[in-house]
Amino acid sequence: MPLDWDRIGTGDSEALLRPRDIYSGLATRPWPYLRHEQGEVLDAWFDRRDDRDVVIKQNTGGGKTAVGLLITQSTLNEGIGKAVYLAPDNYLVKQVRAEADKLGIATTEDPQDPGFLAARTVLVTNYQKLINGKSQFGVVGDGKQPLDLGVVVVDDAHAALARTEDQFRLRVPFTHDAYQALLDLFREDLRHQAPNALADLEARDFSALATIPFWAWADKNEQVLKILHPHRNDDAFKFAWPLIAHVLPLCSATATSAAIEIRPSCPPIDRIPSFARARRRVYLTATLADDSALVTDFQADPALVARPITPGSAADLGERMILAPIALNTDLDDDAVRQLAREYADGDRDGDGVRDAEPINVVVLVPSAQAAAAWKPYADRTHHVQDLAAGVKELQEGHVGLVVMVNKYDGVDLPADACRLLILDGIPRPLDAVERRESVALADSPVRLAREIQRIEQGMGRGVRDSEDYCAVLLLGANLALALHEPRHLQLFSPATQAQLALSREIAEQIHGGGLNDVRQALEACLARDPRWTGRSRRALAEVRYTELGTVRPEAVALRQAFDLAATGLPEKAADRLQKTMNTLDDKPLRGWLREQKAAYLHQINPTSAQQSLVTAVGENQFVLRPLAGVASVQIKPAAVQARAAAGFLATEYTDGITLVLGIKKILEDVVWEVEERSDDAEHAWYRLGLHLGFVSTRPEKQEGKGPDNLWALTSKEFAVTELKTGCVTDTIAKKDLGQLGVSIDWCTAKHPEVKALPVMLHRSRTADQYGTPVPGMRVVTPAKYELLRTAVMKYAVALASDLGNWGEEQAVAMQLAQNKLTGATFFSAYAETCRTAS
């Protein structure tokens, strides 16, 4: 009689509840043992498995996927309910399922799979499958019975945040009938709030951005509903409308030339009952130093989020040497580094054109196709998201050479020889309307810095996938270099990355001022496995510990709780909740930003109080909405002494010479020509440049809704009225742009009748369109003139940052301003040219 194996060895199922025991009991194990760090976090999770929200932090390459899968299997074995494993995209879904196959864990991608519905099989799918207005799991009000879930594991939680926010955003494209209907409905409100922005919208200017005032949006909600509701089943609407329709009056609406974006301040995640009611929600993350977004986006319990589970040691990270060439020597241009990367891919380690070592795979991460174009002469392959899987597979199978990956900073595994030299050439910029507005209002806030550092750390983690792996990392550009040097940035990296950065900085200090050969020498220590480097590298990580408590910012908790109160019909309590937190904050711009949201809630019950709150908000942050009655227009005055103002600003802003040079270089790099999506960056950079040179610098169009992009008080007799058209690609200056500058000159003359208004434009051409008339006296900063300006400003910065460290001394600053023709009296004569008419 044959043996019935189903009746043998199954008497004690209790032993198979612990994830570690589940792994030990596998018939075939992919590894002899779980890593020590994996065992630690799994044991800690098991002890806390009844906590509804659990954050698990492990370094990149620490084996989080296996941890998440074993947690789902444990939950199934315990009989808690169905298990879902969420990955960022379909490419990663396949990776997770491949890992599950190794572990002998049954998975499916089909939500209707009988094994999943019977809580025997783990559903592995992407975030969008669960969180969308047509979710197969059920949405409040759709008549479906929501699927009851025992556990949801959110892998790469940092990636989930952006995608979740996107799912709760209704984007009405300008090609849709509703776009024009909404613009017509709010035209006068926008004209009163921001006439320049409205004009840009109507001219289809790419940089146009205008927020519909919350009072107009709320008061005209019935008309909005009449416009949008008939289109609720359109392709552009159907996935977002069911998620936000019930909170439409609480949403903010921001118009750009591409779309009108409608979104609530926090995602109403309870519209997806399967997620909201899941008995266990586990967030796997490597890089969230700031965990606040888990509270705002997923409605996670802040007290539980603040207690992440981590391994006992943070030494589970692969070995990395991280260098920023521009921080070592500002004369090392990006093309020189690109050539070096090409040589390493070819095995030419000393750059003499002869192969002297094994070729290696060099992987370059860039944020856009435009950034990828700079690598075209050097690259063997360029991959976008749609062809990434094949590209990664090719790298994992052998030598390819130099491979560029476009806008993929997370979810790519490049272990061992798949990537030995990793290069980050920039990071993605905010492109959605709300983020663009926030980037202006909270330009240097910890909130925005944390997001930026998160993307950098995500990108740097692609090349090391376990503790035995190694990779050299180069960061291009001043923005990334600044992140490695400036204390506010550094503290936002994970503890293990901080340790690696500290060690890399010691190397950087020794080769500071050197050329490419010094960079090669440093890279060789890592890539050639010099025992002096590897020993110090391991020792640097040996005693590193994860931070025991997670960071959950009080304003994030307040925003979530206030939104939930308002959504349940308690706007007054929502406003009070925000005020309670504002009373504890020292950050004035952030207080002003929160006060605008408070005013939006107050408007539901007391419009007068709402407008009063907005008056206070503008006093704290000039970039928030202006109240209906407007704000008092403030005249600006030039600094009494330009050099004194510059020295005071520089002394407050910078603590060391390297940060000063990098900070100014970052400003100069942010003025990018012929790339429309960088227009906001250019405007902010020009504003900051003025401050660094000692000019009183403002952004009237953003602060008052009218006036120029920028206003510099050059001297007591002359102000520079500047319009930035750096994104233009035309060979002449358009008539509408000339007209806009003329209107801005009239604005300045009316506001400051005692000074001369100098018309200035940044444009790729100094030639006016044949149908336009240049503004009398107009000066144009062209790319050629800007290059001269860049050189002069860098000389100014490098001289002040010399060993003397005298950037806070008025006399030294005055000398450099004069030598480099950066004074108010000489600036535009030296670095701009007259506008001419087309022949």
Image (cartoon, rainbow, N blue to C red):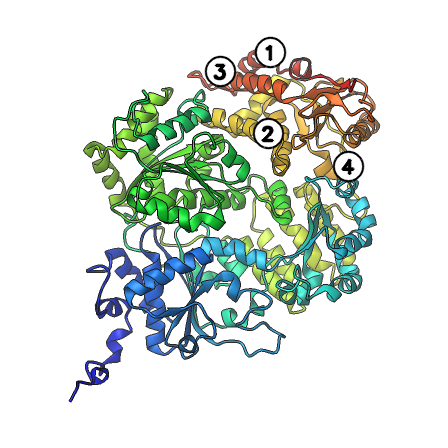
Compared to residue 613, the image places residue 268 above or below, namely below
Instruction: Name the residue beneath numbered marker 3.
Output: 799
Distance between mark 4 and mark 3 Cα atoms: 38 Å
- Per the image, label 3 sits on a secondary structure element best described as helix
Compared to residue 475, the image places residue 54 above or below, namely below
Could you tell me the amino acid type at mark 3? Ala
Distance between mark 4 and mark 2 Cα atoms: 22 Å
Instruction: Name the residue beneath numbered marker 1.
Output: 818
Please provide percent x and percent y for residue 814: 58, 13
Could you tell me the amino acid type at mark 2? Val
Q: Is residue 752 left or right of residue 434?
A: right
Nearer-N-terminus badge (4/3): 4
Q: Is residue 502 left or right of residue 228?
A: left
- Per the image, label 2 sits on a secondary structure element best described as loop
Q: Nearer the viewer, mark 4 or mark 2?
A: 2
Distance between mark 1 and mark 3 Cα atoms: 13 Å
Nearer-N-terminus badge (4/1): 4
Residue 307 visible within the image? no
Q: Tell me if label 2 and label 1 are in contact, CB under 8 Å.
A: no
**Depth check: 799 or 167 in front?**
167
